[in-house]
């Protein structure tokens, strides 16, 4: 019997988590029936954050020595033991065409965005980095490459974070204040807090509002993300068959948050990828939703960093014992 199977046999009846387990404590209660009453720019009730996940050129490939070809492909085909040129070209569509169609759309509708950027992807297409800076969009650290952080040791992950931040300094001229990696490890949040450069992280899916947590006695802000209104669902199992599906899910999400049975404001995350939503029909669906959202006076498009700061104005940072020690 493996150690994992032994653990399951011994603890299947538990009603709490095992003490000393690596990683953050689970936070199952949250705001409960009394979320804070927050308002966003112009007094809006719902802040909509569109996130471009810019990963193209940093994904796992045989070409980069990974001995595998990454997923999130339009067809359920796999090429083993060698480069998959078809899959590589889909990713290249995102960096060659899709990202620029996205920028044109956001310019047309004057929508600020957040970019979850993998450092190597920006290094390999510096014109995209320059466009992010020129538009005034927010860059969030999305790792050095688009790789799973749980596959690395604590020290290796620390090095990856530092390499990413050094790279961002070179490509966009500053280091991001937010972080969202691909599949965080049990060490990620502790490393971010110990690092000291990050205002928040978004490696969390458990709420519709930012919230404060404590890591090693220090307060830390979480700005949650979502995989519901997310274009990965176009090419994954339980997903969108057509842009109209995306528009309906996004519109119904916004409608509910605007009238959610209380007076509390909330945020809405939309996740998109240049290789997916950068295709014409799908960006057309996103543009339809943008027009719909802009017709709602109580909704506003905001960058993630601005959501964080606006939240902090209304729900100030709590003081933990680690914060007092470092004063």
Image (tube, rainbow, N blue to C red):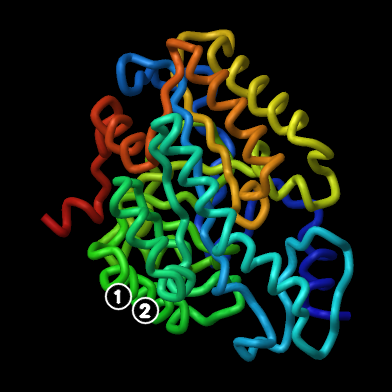
Residue lying furthest left in this view?
A: 327
User: 255 left or right of 197?
Assistant: right
Q: Which residue is mark 1?
A: 166
- 100 and 2: which one is in front? 100
Residue 92 quadrant: bottom right
Residue 149 on image: x %, y %: 55, 72
Dot label at residue 163:
2
Q: Residue at x 59, y 41 (%)?
A: 226
Residue 186 on image: x %, y %: 54, 66
- 208 and 19: which one is in front? 208
Q: Residue at x 67, y 49 (%)?
A: 279
Q: Are marks 1 and 2 in contact (CB under 8 Å)?
A: yes
Q: Secondary structure at mark 1?
A: helix
Q: Secondary structure at mark 2?
A: helix
Is the residue 20 above or below the residue 314 in the image? below
Q: Is residue 20 visible?
A: no
Residue 89 on image: x %, y %: 69, 71
Task: Judge the density around disc 2: few (<14), some (14-19), many (≥20) Cα neighbours within 10 Å.
Answer: some
Is the residue 231 above or below the residue 260 in the image? below
The total number of labels drawn is: 2
Q: Residue at x 79, y 39 (%)?
A: 240
Residue 141 on image: x %, y %: 41, 61
């Amino acid at each position: 019997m493996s150690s994992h199977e032994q653990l399951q046999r011994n603890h299947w009846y538990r009603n709490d988590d095992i003490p000393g387990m690596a990683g953050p404590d689970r936070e199952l209660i949250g705001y409960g029936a009394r979320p804070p009453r927050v308002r966003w720019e112009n007094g809006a009730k719902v802040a909509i954050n569109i996130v471009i996940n810019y990963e193209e050129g940093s994904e796992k490939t045989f070409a980069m020595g990974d001995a595998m070809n990454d997923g999130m492909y339009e067809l359920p085909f796999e090429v083993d033991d060698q480069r998959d040129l078809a899959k590589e070209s889909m990713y290249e569509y995102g960096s060659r065409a899709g990202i620029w169609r996205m920028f044109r759309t956001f310019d047309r509708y004057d929508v600020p965005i957040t970019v979850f950027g993998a450092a190597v992807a920006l290094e390999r297409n510096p014109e995209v980095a320059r466009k992010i800076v020129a538009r005034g969009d927010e860059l969030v650290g999305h790792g050095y490459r688009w790789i799973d952080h749980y596959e690395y040791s604590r020290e290796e992950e620390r090095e990856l974070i530092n390499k990413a931040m050094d790279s961002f300094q070179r490509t966009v001229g500053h280091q991001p204040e937010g972080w969202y990696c691909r599949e965080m490890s049990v060490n990620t949040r502790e490393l971010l807090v110990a690092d000291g450069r990050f205002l928040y992280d978004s490696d969390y899916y458990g709420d519709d509002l930012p919230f404060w947590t404590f890591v090693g006695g220090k307060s830390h802000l979480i700005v949650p993300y979502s995989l519901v209104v997310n274009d990965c669902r176009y090419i994954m199992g339980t997903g969108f068959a057509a842009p109209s599906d995306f528009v309906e899910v996004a519109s119904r999400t916004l409608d509910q948050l605007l009238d959610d049975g209380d007076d509390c404001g909330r945020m809405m995350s939309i996740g998109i990828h240049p290789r997916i939503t950068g295709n014409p029909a799908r960006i057309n669906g996103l543009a339809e939703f943008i027009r719909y959202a802009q017709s709602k006076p109580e909704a506003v498009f905001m960058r993630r960093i601005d959501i964080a700061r606006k939240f902090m104005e209304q729900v100030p940072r709590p003081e933990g014992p680690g914060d007092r020690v470092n004063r």
